[in-house]
Amino acid sequence: MSDIYKAIKADHDRHRELLEILGNTHGDSKERQEAWTEFYHDVKSHAAAEEETFYSKLISKTWGQDDARHSVHEHKELDDLMEELRETDMSSGAWLQKFKKLRHDYEHHIEEEEDEVFAKAREIIPAADIKGYGDRFLERKEQEAKLIEKKREEALEE
């Protein structure tokens, strides 16, 4: 059985690695394309699964509503920025500038989540109440990974 905090942190650690790779590559290289594709798909499925499992649990508690709303709002901002990056030529200066903003904002988001939100959640939510949420998160993430392109197409139609 997977612990929700460890499952989310493991994703964050991989995302940090991918951000490092992206920051150290240049132009429209194969390495940058592969790192970007993995980052884009994993962060999108991670965020959706996190909102549906972890943040839904937090929002059900009065004390957690502000933190959950704040984090979900940041997810939306990051998602918008990732969509801009997806549509921008990787070899352009504009891509690099947008990437630097994404990196800064995402690293801030995950640090805040791990340092502040997790600490509050551990204090307030009994372990028995969140037991099994790690597995739910991983299952939901897998389902969300299959929906990324469909959701993107639907968003473009709106």
Image: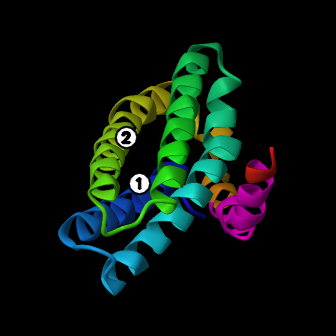
Q: How is the image coloured?
A: rainbow
- Residue 72 lies, in percent from the top left, at 58, 33
Decide if residue 147 is on the left or right side of residue 15: right
Q: What label does residue 114 carry, if any?
A: 2
View extreme (left): residue:
24
For label 2, the crowd category at 10 Å Cα-Cα, with few meaning under 14, some 14 to 19 and many 20 or more, is some
Q: What stretch is highlighted in magenta?
A: 138-155
Dots 1, 2 in contact, CB < 8 A? yes
Under mark 2, the amino acid is Glu
Percent position of residue 150, x then y = 78, 63
Q: Distance between the residues labelled 1 and 2?
A: 7 Å
Identify which residue is drawn at 58% across, 56% down: 44
- Helix, strand or loop at label 1? It is helix
24 relative to 52 in the view: left or right? left
Give SS at disc 2: helix
Neighbour class for label 1 at 10 Å: few (<14), some, many (≥20)? Answer: some
Name the residue nearer the viewer: 157 or 152. 157
Image quadrant in which the C terminus is located? top right
Q: Where residue 141 appears, x then y in whole percent?
A: 65, 62
Which residue is at a point 38% across and 38% down the rendered structure image? 109
At x 62%, y 36%, the residue is 55
Q: Nearer the viewer, residue 65 or 42?
A: 42
141 part of magenta stretch: yes
Q: Residue 9 carries which label?
A: 1
